[in-house]
Image (cartoon, rainbow, N blue to C red):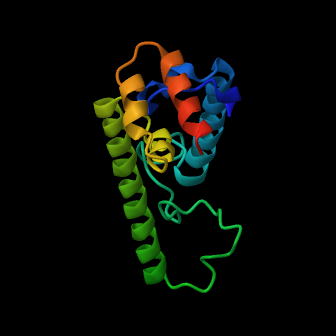
Amino acid sequence: LFDASVTAPAINHFQQVPTFFWVALGVGVVLTEVTRINTAWQSPFEASRLFLLKDDHVPGDYGFDPLGLAKGKSTNDLKGIRMKELNNGRMAMIAIAAMVGQELNTGVNVLLGDAALNQGELANLEAKCAFAADEAACSKAFEAAMATL
């Protein structure tokens, strides 16, 4: 992705992604939010007060179910499934935060470290890469570790 130009610990990836990606992502977010607002919220010009949801709207239900997973499920089942999905999302956010924290602490990319660990090269990679200001050193260490695979 991006011709492997996004490197180093994950905390630094945002600064390395090309501008076109951020523009496209911004346009996508705006379109999604406009659709969400039009689907869920009452018009402020027609409602009795501001910030009211439509009476028939169920939070989180935007009619997107291409596989038909919600068909035939009771309201209680759907509430349980939604809660499980929220909890899974929260757990994923905690996991990503932990991975970024580990990368900041050790200076070694989590995924690259896993590949090198399988070959016993993690200590070598850590020594060459930890807190290195020069990304070329990290890249060379990674290439050396991958050459042994």
**Quadrant of the rendered image containing residue 2:** top right
Count the numbered circles shown. 0
Q: Residue 63 appears at what percent x and percent y?
A: 64, 63
Question: Residue at point 47% right, 60% down?
Answer: 59
The residue depicted at 66 percent of the width and 67 percent of the height is 65
**Percent position of residue 116, x then y:** 48, 42
Q: Is residue 111 above or below residue 62?
A: above
Task: Name which residue lies at 32% across and 39% down.
Answer: 102
Q: Quadrant of residue 122?
A: top left
- Nearer to us in this view, 126 or 82: 126
Q: Quadrant of residue 69?
A: bottom right
Q: Is 13 left, or right, of 69 in this rendering?
A: left
- Residue 149 percent coordinates (x, y): 60, 45
* Residue 39 x %, y %: 60, 52
- In the displayed orientation, state which residue is furthest to the top: 134
Which quadrant is home to the N terminus? Answer: top right
Q: Nearer the viewer, residue 100 or 130?
A: 130
- Residue at the spot x=69%, y=22% of the render? 20
- Rendered position, 33 above or below 39: above
